Amino acid sequence: MDKTAHLVRELSEAGSSVLTVTRLHPDLVSESMPINVHDSIWLSERPGKRNVPPDQLNRLFQSISAFLSRQSDGTVVLEGVEYILMYNDMKRVLAMIERINDIVMASQAVLVMPVDPMSLDPRTLAYLRRSAEVIG
């Protein structure tokens, strides 16, 4: 998370609004990433205004899409892909990521998606690497 926090901090300092989508409770996000987080989505089955259950991919996509429509040069940190994959078919998750990536490419936004390469099967990891710039 250190590399992610450093990259996101640089983007935030450059003026980019940040949306975090994470398994971490929003209070813990501010501790792990000492930046000005504009908005936060907690991947959780607990009820809450900014909580999205990991099996509700359309709701997650709509939340990210709404943020990017308001902040076309924003930064989206999508942390927790491994967790989302536990609740959904791989093809559906990759399709959602592709839809998010389409919105990001059509604007001046940035998508930061930290993943542990050891937690994904080689095929899924290869697909993600083809669609993104790998940083360290």
Image (spheres, grey):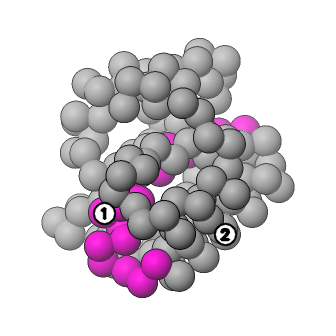
Identify the disc placed on residue 99.
Answer: 2
Looking at the image, is mark 2 or mark 1 earlier in the sequence?
1
The answer to the question of whether label 2 and label 1 lie on touching residues, with beta carbons closer than 8 A, is no
Range of residues picked out in magenta: 73-90
Indicate the quadrant where residue 49 lies: bottom left
Q: Residues within 10 Å of mark 1 (few under 14, many from 20)?
A: some
Relative horizontal placement of residue 12, taking residue 87 as reference (left or right): right
- Expressed as whole percent of the image width and height from the top left, the position of residue 71 reads 67, 43
At 48% from the left and 36% from the top, the residue drawn is 38
Say if the magenta span includes residue 86. Answer: yes
User: Does the segment drawn in magenta span residue 110?
Assistant: no
Q: How many other residues sit within 10 Å of disc 2, few (<14), some (14-19) or many (≥20)?
A: some
Residue flagged by tag 1: what amino acid is it?
A: Tyr
Which mark, by number, is residue 83? Answer: 1
* Circle 1 SS class: helix
Q: Front-most of 38 and 7?
A: 7
Q: Amino acid at mark 2?
A: Arg
Q: Position of residue 43 (x, y in %)?
A: 30, 60
Query: Does residue 51 lie above or below 38 as drawn?
Result: below
Look at the image and tell me in which quarter the N terminus lies: top left
- Left or right of 90? Residue 1 is left
Residue located at (42% from left, 66% from top): 121
Q: Quadrant of residue 76?
A: top right
Query: Tag on residue 18?
Result: none
Residue projecting furthest to the left: 46
Q: Position of residue 77 (x, y in %)?
A: 49, 44
Q: Is residue 95 visible?
A: yes
Q: Identify the residue at horizontal 34%, vertical 57% (top origin).
A: 119
Whether residue 62 is visible:
no
